[in-house]
Amino acid sequence: MPEEILRRVLTVPVYDVAEETPLEVAPLLSKRLQNKVWLKREDLQPVFSFKLRGAYNCMVNLSDEQKQAGVIAASAGNHAQGVALSASKMGIKATIVMPRTTPPIKVNAVKNLGGNVVLHGDTYDEASKHAKQLMVEESLTFIHPYDDLDVIAGQGTIALEMLRQHSKPFDVIFVAVGGGGLISGVAAVIKQVSPKTRIIGVEPEDAACMTEALKAGERVVLDQVGLFADGVAVAQVGEIPFRIAQTCVDEMVTVKTDEICAAVKDIFEDTRAIAEPAGAVALAGMKKFVEKYEVSGLEMAAIVSGANMNFDRLRHISERTELGEKREAIFAVTINEEPGSFKQFCELLGGRRSITEFNYRYSDPKSAVVFAGVRTEGGRPEREAILNELVSKGYAVEDMTDNEMAKLHLRFMVGGHANGVKNELLYRFEFPERPGALLQFLSQMSEEWNISLFHYRNHGAAYGRVLVGVQVPPEQSDDFEAYLQNLGYRYVNEQDNPGYGLFLKSKQ
């Protein structure tokens, strides 16, 4: 299989539409990581993503009959633009099925490239199912985003460019993984030309379909997929990419949302370009790899795979970058509610360190809980030192730095405990960002259940995050569980989250 990919890569005519993107050294990252860091700038393609390569190579190899009939694809953004631009260049009619949750900037980009956009479903899987139905009904050719030899070969041209652009073999190349088309194309080429180069795949922790597949020795379907890095949010890796990865990928690394946000900032600081979350995943993996193995002096490359960023997502990303760099810690600290105690606590924290955030509201005559953010240049060791220092001074402290509910919701709604709220259950939901989604959630809820807490904040993504408190009598717990199952939205029970007890839970 890798031999077939390389054979096809050598004859791919992608430069009819794509460009040979630069391989740039990242001086700031190189200095920080103590390795020579190179960035392959696929964010500079005409559609701001590598997807154009595979889409065009697949379409140029269609028969005349298939071209005349037209093509269809399902995508939430990058593949859609690749197919639309390729179709425009070749004079082929292209229909693109996109989820209704797709941000308008991406829908309009496809339309501007000449694609006929059909909005259907809330997820890629729903859009893909509808696209395949239209394919049969209208006798169209389906252009798969990753599970196709010609698509994989198109992505493999990136590896040929990197080999030409670098004077000696790389020690390690990091590649983001969604369905697997990019890493299988790159790995198949590199391992035959430069077999000692290590190929490391990188995935978000909550969308690690290739990681789990390689562990199991077979393709698996993830029950739930995190949506922050939507360009790599895939529940099951492709069949062809998986077979190639089994022999050509050396290791997989998974990264957290905060680490991806930090990598977006790193790319900006070295290039002044803004990568989308999926485009920064490979670099986030490189940083984690260097920290884990403590390597130095190596020639390392990361593929910046895309830059189709919604501007309003930058707010959320910027809020999380310091946490991702381990330069900020968040604590919930209980102090005595008496004159002078608040000042004393501030002096202890702020005398030598920068305070990034401070939230407090009176709620109890004996004690108070403050939500505090602290700058930590020393990473985790300094964070633990602060924690130990506070404990040694007699404070009750809860480390909230890795608490997702605290970072998404709690820090924006600290305001005191409610009083007299009985039988409250706390859940965190992910809603599709489309008209009617919130109404659907509320309309399925029994009128007997009162909403006692609600916090929503738009992060510019396809899915919004909502924290909801609902009063459910114990005898109706089974009915509420059935409601959750029938709702069809991803949810997390936050009843035992320490932040809930410290800041929000009713004091009865």
Image (tube, grey):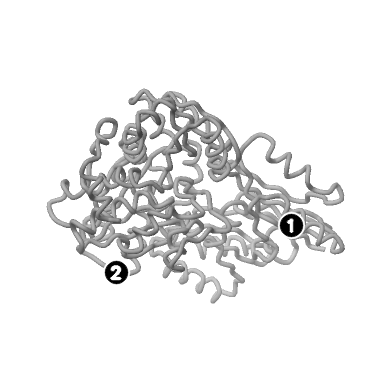
Disc on res. 20: none
Give the labeled residue for mark 1. Answer: 417
Which is nearer the eye, 502 or 449? 449
Query: Badges 1 and 2: C-beta atoms under 8 Å apart?
Result: no
Q: Quick one: label 1, few (<14), some, or many (20+) residues within 10 Å?
A: some
Q: In which quarter of the image is residue 245?
A: bottom left
What residue is drawn where x is 39% and y is 29%? 65
Viewer can see residue 338: no
Q: In this view, does 358 lie above or below 75?
A: below
Classify 10 Å Cα crowding around label 2: few (below 14), some (14-19), many (20 and above). few
Rendered location of residue 406, percent (x, y): 59, 57
- The mark nearer the N terminus, 1 or 2, is 2
226 vs 249, nearest the viewer: 249
The type of residue carrying mark 1 is: His
The x and y percentages for residue 150 are 33, 43
Residue at the image point whose x is 55% and y is 40% from the top? 127
Q: Which of 206 and 288 is in front in this view?
A: 206
Q: Most extreme residue toward the bottom, as rendered?
A: 392
Q: Is residue 68 left or right of residue 450?
A: left
Residue that protrudes farthest toward the left in the picture = 167
Residue flagged by tag 2: what amino acid is it?
Glu
Q: Return the mark for residue 294.
A: 2
Residue sitting at the far front: 65
Residue positioned 35% across, 28% down in the render = 64
Q: Position of residue 352 (x, y in %)?
A: 43, 62
Where 492 falls versus 121 (above or below)? below
- Can residue 349 be seen by looking at this rendering? yes
Depth order, front residue of 410/128: 128
